[in-house]
Amino acid sequence: MARWIKAELHFGSFCSYRIPNTSPQYALASPVPSPAALKLALVDAAIRYSGNIDTGREVFQGVKDSHIEINFPEWVTIMRHFIKRLKPRGEQLLESTAIREYCHLSGALSIYIEVDDKLIDTVSMLFAKLRRLGTTDSLLWCSSTDIAEPDLTLSWMDFGTPAIPLRASNFERRLVVTLNDIDEKATFDSLNPYSSKGGRRFISLTKVLPLVAEERAENWVRYKRKAFKFR
């Protein structure tokens, strides 16, 4: 039997998740991590705290095909910055510039993942040990975990599916992002960057978020949470 685990995640500061297939020189950000980033963060935590690769392999098999839903805080702001950065080239660091977007969330991000009963305790423990999701500029901590089901009206929706009724309020001024999930054919070794087997296997998802643009200026947009309407 599968049940939903809810984890309340708080970012220590601004976070930045570059939308897949966008240029590092002009990095557009998603205000939410991808399903792949969430699942692989749990696998990474399992390896780091157990010191055992096989533990990570077991967690990977348990969460690879899990459904994930996310409930947003009331406000999300996306800011665009012109930054200087140092790029390694040989033994030198060369200065370059780039555009990077950063996100600020007004509260906790509620993550829901559906896992088998036998993994409930393990996954809850791993959420408590998370310190980042993928990138080092997205530091966070988990304040609590619980057994609870998500509010689907406040979660992301797959674009172009019958799940979203075709009405203006479900699309007007909403944020749409492209995210990665793990392909059903992927294996632990194919996603392990240290494995000789290599070959990263992801699928691309287009998600409509329950966020509506409320205010904007030259380099920022503030989004307000707005539930989808199914009836």
Image (tube, rainbow, N blue to C red):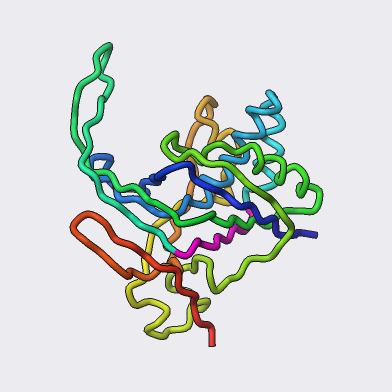
Quadrant location, the C terminus: bottom right
Please indicate whether residue 53 sits to the left or right of residue 15 in the image.
right
- Report the predominant secondary structure element of the magenta stretch: loop
User: Is the residue 28 above or below the residue 85 in the image?
Assistant: below
- Residue 86, given in percent of the width and then of the height, sits at 25, 25
Q: Residue 155 at x, y = what percent?
A: 53, 66
Q: Is residue 61 magenta?
A: no
The residue at 40%/59% (across/down) is: 76
Kindly identify the residue that appears in the image at 63 percent across and 66 percent down.
Answer: 150
**x and y percentages locating residue 199 in the rendered image:** 48, 36
Q: Quick one: 79 or 70, which is closer to the camera?
A: 79
Where does the N terminus fall, quadrant-wise?
A: bottom right
In the rendered image, the residue lying farthest to the bottom is 231
Residue segment shown in magenta: 65-74
User: Is 164 drawn above or below residue 82 in the view shown?
Assistant: below
**Depth check, front residue: 64 or 221:** 221
Q: Residue furthest top?
A: 91
Q: Is residue 17 left or right of residue 143?
A: left
Q: Residue furthest front?
A: 106
Q: In the rendered view, would you say 125 is above or below 1?
A: above
Q: Nearer the viewer, residue 24 or 21?
A: 24
Quarter where residue 55 is shown? top right
Q: How many marks?
A: 0
Q: Is residue 69 magenta?
A: yes
Percent position of residue 99, x then y: 22, 43
Residue at the location (80% across, 53% down)? 117
Judge whether 46 appears above or below 81 on screen. Answer: above
